[in-house]
Amino acid sequence: DAGVTQSPTHLIKTRGQQVTLRCSPKSGHDTVSWYQQALGQGPQFIFQYYEEEERQRGNFPDRFSGHQFPNYSSELNVNALLLGDSALYLCASSLEGLAGRSSYNEQFFGPGTRLTVL
Amino acid sequence: GQNIDQPTEMTATEGAIVQINCTYQTSGFNGLFWYQQHAGEAPTFLSYNVLDGLEEKGRFSSFLSRSKGYSYLLLKELQMKDSASYLCAVRDNQAGTALIFGKGTTLSVSS
């Protein structure tokens, strides 16, 4: 059973560019959450997708947008990149639909995409 | 808003016991999680508490006091492989099932 996968592993961009990161959830999961983790910090919640819609959003600007596809995979897009966007971007999946909901909706994290903005 | 505090760094020796504390402030507490994260890797789930008390899972235990806004992670019989960052995260009703993380505690285990 494949866990959460993310691509690419590493990415280098320059200021002002746009980037798309991809995530495939753990088999059977229907919800994808995205987090940004700066060096030496804990992950910060960006947004969460369920049933192809953004359900929750953290304190991130509109430059950060996302999408969820019918197969539950997800993309994170960041426009007009800033130096401060350099971070590890983590995707986490969970099962939160009515069927099979666990008592605590554990989130399983992918290995992340390391984004460097120069 | 939410606020989560945990020590930045801790050190311990192999075979010892270490307790990592976490204090939190949320308006609608709905569960507390501990994750382990080795350098350059994804966080992995360790424990979950939503009611007061102690949850034990092998060498790891986690405690919660909701009235004090306090949790700790207890690691027994420390091994070198336990050197990692330990992340405390809470779930707030206002944020659905999103996790709000602390900055993490880097634990270094020496022989």
Image (cartoon, coloured by chain):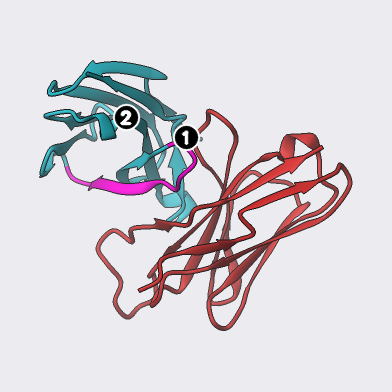
Chain A appears what colour? red
Q: Quadrant of residue A65?
A: bottom right
Chain B appears what colour? cyan
* Spatial CA span between label 2 and label 1: 28 Å
Tags 2 and 1 both on a single chain: yes
Q: Amino acid at mark 1?
A: Gln
The residue shown at (38%, 26%) is B105
Q: Is residue B2 above or below residue A109?
A: above
What's the magenta region? B39-51
Disc 2 or 1, which lies upstream in sequence?
1
In the picture of the structure, the residue carrying the numbered disc 2 is B83
B94 left or right of B9 in image: right
Q: Chain of mark 2?
A: B
The residue shown at (78%, 52%) is A63
Q: Residues within 10 Å of mark 1 (few under 14, many from 20)?
A: some
Q: Nearer the viewer, residue B79 or B47?
A: B79
In this view, which residue lies farthest toward the bottom? A70
Q: Nearer the viewer, residue A111 or B81?
A: B81
User: Residue B102: horizontal and vertical position, in percent?
Assistant: 44, 32
Task: Point out the image quarter for the N terminus of chain A.
Answer: bottom left
A65 left or right of A46 in image: right
User: Residue A11: horizontal and vertical position, in percent?
Assistant: 71, 50
Q: Quadrant of residue B108?
A: top left
Number of the label disc, if any, that sits on residue B2: 1
Q: Quadrant of residue A96?
A: bottom left
Q: Is residue B76 above or below residue B111?
A: below
Q: Chain of mark 1?
A: B
Mark 1 and mark 2 in contact (Cβ < 8 Å)?
no
Q: Secondary structure at mark 2?
A: loop
Q: Secondary structure at mark 1?
A: loop
Q: Amino acid at mark 2?
A: Ser
The residue shown at (55%, 52%) is A112
